[in-house]
Image (cartoon, rainbow, N blue to C red):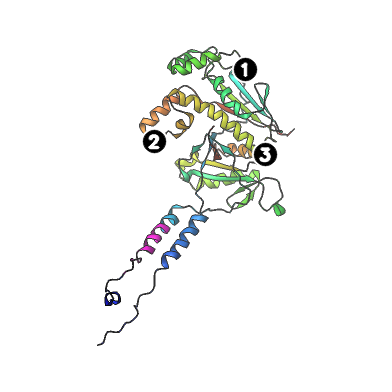
Amino acid sequence: MPKFGKKSNTSQDIPTAALPDIIFMLLFFFMVTTVLRETDILVKQKLPKAAQLSKLERKSLVSYIYIGEPKQSKIFGKEPKIQVNDVFVEVDEIIQFVNQEKDKLNEAERDQITMSLKVDVESKMGIVSDVQQELREANARKILYSSVQSIDI
Amino acid sequence: MARKNRPTAEIPNGSMADIAFLLLIFFLVTTTIANDKGIAMLLPPKPDPNQPPPEVTKNDRNIFKILANSQDKLLVEDEPLSDVFELREMVRSFILNFGSPGEEGVEIYNSLPSSMKAYSSSIRRSDYSDDPTEAVVSFKADRGTSYELYVQVLDQVNAAYNDVYGERVGLSAAEFLQLDRDDPVQDKKYQAARQGIPRAISIAEPNKIAN
């Protein structure tokens, strides 16, 4: 009987003191590796689906142009608009944007700038081709129609 | 000194893990992994105002014409096409037609694996391309064409080219796309696949006025 009442000196807890450290390590890993979105996207972005996609090789050479119907259609209307950085721009302001982006790069890399066009599926080709004409004008000829991988048939 | 049963002086840190987990889950949920994949294209250089636009000297049969109107209807080689997914096979047979190959064309033909030679001899249409070096796929969209269709057509045409490239080195189109050009062995394969057959996709400027 007295055997049951005996207190042992060893603690019966599993040491959990190191658990937070492990979790924090995971946390820091995710915080460091994930890229937070730099810009607020003001347009609808449902990207088209395609199967034959190629990856971008160097992210530092990529600039983004967003095209789509504004999310706040009450203020900006329903017509698709072009967004770069955080603002809406008109078609003729794109050259200026491209030149700004080119200035951020080394001189040797300026010709390799890639424009990633993130265009909403509901947009029409008119606005896209206007942008393309401006990009030709600005000599940023490498473009990428950003799309989502669809299952290959 | 009498031993007392004192409570331990530690701060309870059992819930620290929970807090960290909460943060972890928050970051997991809020961050989006950027998907930077898409259909790569090279735009033509800007037209020189001092020079007139170049004359099209290509033979008509060497140009595979795809037109899309503002109602998203396709006209392929002057015939309406309802299913965009048929394009892949059509473009493939157009490229590998070898109607009347030139010197380079014969060289390419001889380098093809036997399955592709058999495929090519099963087509032989007089209204398709002379040989792959001459073949051009021309795509013209209207201003009112939806972007979705535009991407689908480009995807199909690219798929046809990737089919051809892949098959030359015994890969599927998807496997061909996966080739890593930084690896010398795979780069060699890539070069062998691409050799002699240009990915000639011409995107015409849409009309200025939508109809």
Q: Give the magenta range.
A: A12-27
Quadrant in which residue A46 is drawn:
top right
- Residue furthest left as drawn: B1
- Could you tell me which chain the residue with mark 1 belongs to? B
Q: Is residue A74 magenta?
A: no
Q: Mark 3 to mark 1: distance in Å? A: 29 Å
Residue B138 position within the rendered picture, expressed as x and y whole percent measured from the top left: 61, 26
Question: Is B169 on the left or on the right of A68, as rendered?
Answer: left
Using the image, determine if residue A105 lies above or below residue B129.
below
Q: Earlier in the sequence, mark 2 or mark 1?
A: 1
Using the image, determine if residue B205 lies above or below residue A79.
above
- Residue furthest right as drawn: B211
Residue B170 position within the rendered picture, expressed as x and y whole percent measured from the top left: 43, 25
Residue that badge 2 annotates: B182
Question: Is A88 on the left or on the right of B93, as rendered?
Answer: right
Residue that badge 1 annotates: B60
What SS does tag 2 mark?
Answer: loop
**Amino acid beneath label 2:** Asp
